[in-house]
Image: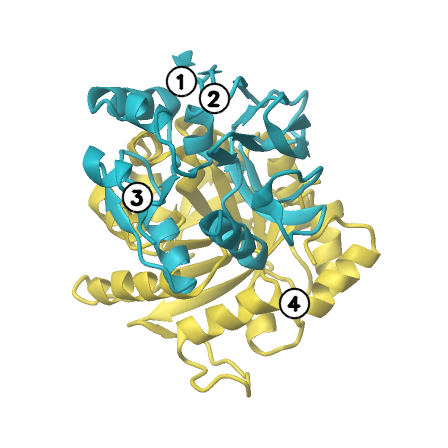
Chain colours: A yellow, B cyan
Amino acid sequence: MLTKRIIPCLDIKDGRTVKGVNFEQLRDAGDPIELAALYAQQGADELVFLDITATIEKRKTLSELVNKIAHRINIPFTVGGGIKTEADVSMLLQNGADKISINTAAFIDPSIIHRFAKNFGSQCVVLAIDTKLEADGNWYVYLNGGRQKTDSLTTEWAKKAVDLGVGEILLTSMNHDGTKQGFALDITATLSSQLSVPIIASGGGGSAAHFYDVFTQGKADAALAASIFHYKEVAIPDLKKYLQQKGISIRI
Amino acid sequence: MKIVIIQYNAGNIQSVLYALERLGMAAVVTDDAAEIEAADKVIFPGVGEASTAMQYLKDRKLDVLIKNLKQPVLGICLGMQLMCLHSTENETPCMGIFSTQVKQFKPLDTTIKVPQIGWNTISNLKSDLFQGVPENSYAYFVHGYYAALGEHTMATTNYVEAYSSALQKDNFYGVQFHPEKSALVGEQIIKNFLSL
């Protein structure tokens, strides 16, 4: 049976892990390769690397880093952040990334979804959506790392993107992100029920029970988290054992 | 040992190269006929669309070359599908090494997602490829089309229905999952292929 996936996310800036991490067993806790290898060994099902490097010159650092990660780890990984052109995608895939994730650039020019899917295959095109529940009761799409609101409903944008060829959706609830109070179950379940592609839930995971909730009530195919893994608030082996005992299909 | 990875217009070739490097093995990535024929082991990887990949191989006569290889050949994902009889992906006639049809997953509702992305179990393991690999081990899959069950099935996986997650006929081996991304299980399968 296909398992639910647990995905640690690493924010990268200038080739280093941004959020502080707290692992004694790492020689260099800011080195994303060391952290990635540790998560892979602990049983992470995939990894996501989000590059928040500001300048284009520093982008070369990213492809070198991706190449080093691909040499080291034996599980799939996605790279996102500032990807706009076929050349960006090609460079990352050639250096060993399995998938790329796009967000603002795809919203501004949705035709890149179709072009990326056609040239590289839908399976490697992940659409990241930052979404926020507004007072009117609707979930809206936000751009530029959540700084810019749009008038687009998340359900409509996600459906359009699937029609254009995205292979997966990484959905981050801005209302839940950083709260550690649980994932956004309703919008995750809505998208998962309406769409034919896998949904990765992100934002709000603070305990093992939250992951159980997002896989059952939230109907998510995968769940992503960052700091709770970095700070060892939830250990991946314990989380997976808990989920398996609760009857969730999980790879141990 | 000389290992060749066949180069063509499909993704994830680097990942296979790096997986071999992690096992301390070097490989040559090439579409040169003489180099492929001279190899001890040939790996035929691939992620992509069937008709485009098949046309590329035909233009370079690589389809005939692969079919006539005598050394162990391992097709991965799309590589394995192209070694089958026919794919319904843009109605593509394939190489016909395995007597198996490749069809699209057609789930009845959105509770089952297409493509299948993630870790699933491999069962009924029969080939030398699975020496030391426990029944129901997890492997990483990314695919929207699958090879049906048949006489060359060497492992089965369930998604929408039971299908072939590995095939073998004589010196030809194929796996639907990605051993290069399947953690320790995948490494064992690659090691097994290299020691055939």
Q: Are marks 2 and 1 on the same chain?
A: yes
Q: Which numbered marker is on residue A236? A: 4
State the CA–CA distance, disc 2 to disc 4: 39 Å
State the CA–CA distance, disc 3 to disc 2: 22 Å
Q: Amino acid at mark 4?
A: Ile
Disc 2 residue crowd, few under 14, some 14–19, many 20+, Cα 10 Å: many
Whether label 1 touches label 4, CB < 8 Å: no
- Which secondary structure lies at badge 4? helix
Q: Are marks 1 and 4 on the same chain?
A: no
Chain under numbered label 4: A
- For label 3, the residue is B39
State the CA–CA distance, disc 2 to disc 1: 6 Å
Q: Amino acid at mark 1?
A: Cys
- Which secondary structure lies at badge 3? loop
Between marks 1 and 4 in the image, the one whose residue lies nearer the viewer: 1
Whether label 2 touches label 4, CB < 8 Å: no
Q: Which numbered marker is on residue B94? A: 1
Residue B23, picture quadrant: bottom left
Q: Are marks 3 and 1 on the same chain?
A: yes
* Residue B147 point in image, percent of width and height: 55, 24
The answer to whether B71 is drawn above or below residue B135 in the figure is above
- Which secondary structure lies at badge 1? loop
* Residue B38 point in image, percent of width and height: 26, 41
* Residue A49 point in image, percent of width and height: 42, 61
Chain under numbered label 3: B
Disc 1 residue crowd, few under 14, some 14–19, many 20+, Cα 10 Å: many
Q: Which numbered marker is on residue B84? A: 2
Label whose residue precedes the other's in the sequence (3 or 1) = 3
- Which secondary structure lies at badge 2? loop
The quadrant of the picture occupied by the C terminus of chain A is bottom right
Between marks 4 and 3 in the image, the one whose residue lies nearer the viewer: 3
